[in-house]
Image (cartoon, rainbow, N blue to C red):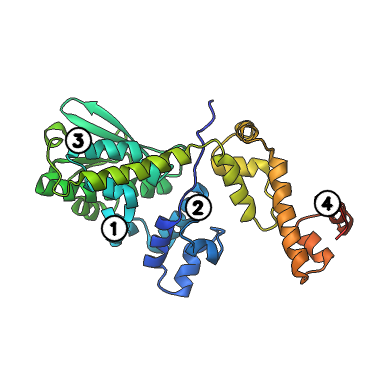
Amino acid sequence: MPDPIDLRPAPMSYFQLILRRFGVNDTLREAILAGVGLSPDEIESPASEINFAQQMRQFDNMNRLFGEGWLLDAPELWRPAAHGALGVAVMTSASLDEAVHVIARYISARTPNQRLKMIRGEGAVILRHGLPVELPEAQTKISVEVVFLSLGAMLRWLLGEVSSQVRYEFVWTRPEYAERLKEVLGAEVAWNAGSNAVVIPETLLEIRSPLADPVLHDAAVHRLEQARRASRASGGVKSRIEHLLANSDSGRLGSAEAARTLGLSQRTLVRRLAESGVTYRDLVDAELKTRAQRWLDAGVLSRGEISERLGFADATSFSRACRRWFKTVR
């Protein structure tokens, strides 16, 4: 079986939107963050990213707390403004045809592990949803609904009343909140379909956007292209492993667990890191060194306490590591 493609980190912004909308008190906030493994500083930083497993854990927590369909209660999570440069590029496109091409090409620049394959069928353009790895049904549902609700909001802005001619197809059986979902989408909805897809009649493609702005559109597309290229950079796996290690309790994480988190086989993980000129052991060692230096300089913890926190078998092993790292016994 071929290796699954690399799972890429996503911007923190959508994670933050969910937390701010539903984490209205300390108890709910703590429950939404349960098991996610992010520090308060990381959550609040606009430059932070989350990995795929962290996003899915947040989705699981939301389903457990509020039940499936919770996304329907938060239109601020799927309006065009929630999607940054992608929302701007779609809304300022000259026509629906151009907007659809933008969505298909750049959705992964905004949500790196979601994709829409554009297929021209008989009398229609189909945007077929895909994920890089197989997920439990509950996680798949919310992943698809995030994309389709966001896409639906954009199409309603662009098409007005004729957006009702668009059809949304879902592979699972009709859920309890089906009527609410259909009302929000404002279009035809089909269940038990062969794939998760959005079907747009060709007759709608030439409709001009009421918000067309070529200057703003080009600027947004330029930003999306930069993000798209950055997410595909060969050093991406290295930075993601560094992020995982930095957020682990001891600075250690087994390579098998790291590979699973990124959706890679261990063999692919080793190869990707080799392309960046490092080994997995190098990255673990670098994280342990960084933590050791910070705690030694702070002078608050004893050497024994640092050794234990870093997962060394004993203080002697930690001292040997310090001699290697710092060329002296600190």
Quadrant of residue 274 within the rendered picture: top right
Q: Judging from the image, what secondary structure is the residue with disc 3 in?
A: helix
User: Mark 1 or mark 3, which has the lower sequence index?
Assistant: 1
Q: Residues within 10 Å of mark 2 (few under 14, many from 20)?
A: many
Residue position for label 4: 321
Q: Amino acid at mark 2?
A: Ile
> Where's residue 255, x and y in %?
67, 41
Q: Secondary structure at mark 2?
A: strand
Residue ranking furthest to the bottom? 25
Mark 1 crowdedness (10 Å alpha carbons): few <14, some 14-19, many ≥20: some
Which of pointers 1 and 4 indicates the residue nearer the eye? 4
Q: Is residue 96 left or right of residue 5?
A: left
Question: Does any portion of residue 151 appear in the rendered image?
Answer: no
> Upstream in the sequence, badge 1 or badge 4?
1
Which of label 2 and label 3 is nearer to you? Answer: 3
Please give the residue where the numbered disc 1 appears in the rendered image: 72
**Pointer 4 local density, CA inside 10 Å: few below 14, some 14–19, many at least 20:** some
Q: Nearer the viewer, mark 1 or mark 2?
A: 2
Q: Quadrant of the C terminus?
A: bottom right
Quick one: label 2 or label 3, which is nearer the N terminus? Answer: 2
Check disc 2 and report the residue beneath it: 50
The amino acid type of the residue labelled 3 equals Asp
Question: Residues under labels 1 and 2: Cα distance?
Answer: 23 Å
Task: Choose the circle earlier in sequence order: 2 or 4.
Answer: 2
Cβ–Cβ under 8 Å for marks 2 and 3: no
Residue drawn at point x = 74 percent, y = 69 percent: 298
Whether the residues at callouts 2 and 4 have beta carbons within 8 Å, the answer is no
Indicate which disc, 4 or 3, sits on the residue closer to the N terminus.
Answer: 3
Q: Which residue is mark 3?
A: 97
Residue extending furthest front?
215
